[in-house]
Amino acid sequence: SASEPTASLGEELPSVPAHAPFSLNILVKVKTMQQQNGLRHQDYHRYRQYCSRRLHRIRKATKLTNGRERFKKCAIPDDFSLDKVLEIPLVSAERAWAYSAELLGVYAQFIEDKPALRYHGIGRLRKAVRYAQILLAMCRVHCDSRT
């Protein structure tokens, strides 16, 4: 009908979530994780390991694991009722960023040029941006305006 909004050229309409908007204080959460897990001493490796463990715990708690034996990627659902699901792209972005910083730090220490190391670090940074964009899209649908 004429009163229904329509999507143009493949755009999806944001669905209305079946829960109250979540409130997620992202900056405080990230800064706390960083300060308590290695970044106070610029230890990106330790922070990346922490992010991997945290990601595993979140996926296990939300039952969004990637399966056994043969890898089957478990996509994040569009409709969810736990705010922990929002932490999956957040922690994934932090892990990719920490790995990028670790690789680029190692690259800077080499005397001879190692372009593969540099490009791998840049690729991980690109992946961190992709996860941040996913988080932003999820927050626009599932979170309040302050988040």
Image: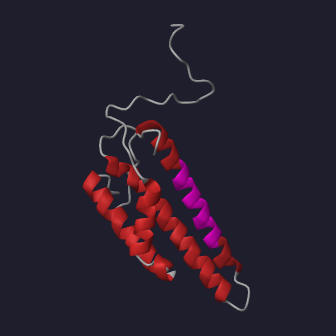
Q: Farthest residue in the top direction?
A: 1
Q: Position of residue 59 (x, y in %)?
A: 32, 57
- Is 41 drawn above or below residue 139 in the view shown? below
Asked which quadrant contains residue 7, the reply is: top right
144 or 45: which is nearer to us?
144
Asked which quadrant contains residue 20, the reply is: top left
Q: Position of residue 105 (x, y in %)?
A: 61, 81
Q: Left or right: where does residue 38 sit relative to residue 2?
A: left
Question: Magenta span has 123?
Answer: yes
How many marks on residues?
A: 0
Q: Left or right: where does residue 99 sit relative to residue 47?
A: right
Question: Magenta span has 145?
Answer: no
Q: What's drawn in magenta, residue-wise?
A: 120-133
From where the camera sits, is residue 78 visible? Answer: yes
- Is 40 drawn above or below residue 136 in the view shown? below
Q: Position of residue 5 (x, y in %)?
A: 53, 17
Q: Residue at x 55, y 19 (%)?
A: 6
Q: Residue at x 52, y 80 (%)?
A: 42
- Is 99 drawn above or below residue 17 in the view shown? below
Q: Farthest residue in the bottom direction?
A: 111
Q: Residue at x 67, y 89 (%)?
A: 110
Q: Left or right: where does residue 31 sit relative to residue 85?
A: right
Q: Farthest residue in the right direction?
A: 113
From where the camera sits, is residue 68 visible? Answer: no
Color scheme of the displayed model: secondary structure
Majority secondary structure in the magenta region: helix
69 or 75: which is nearer to us?
75
Q: Position of residue 9 (x, y in %)?
A: 63, 27
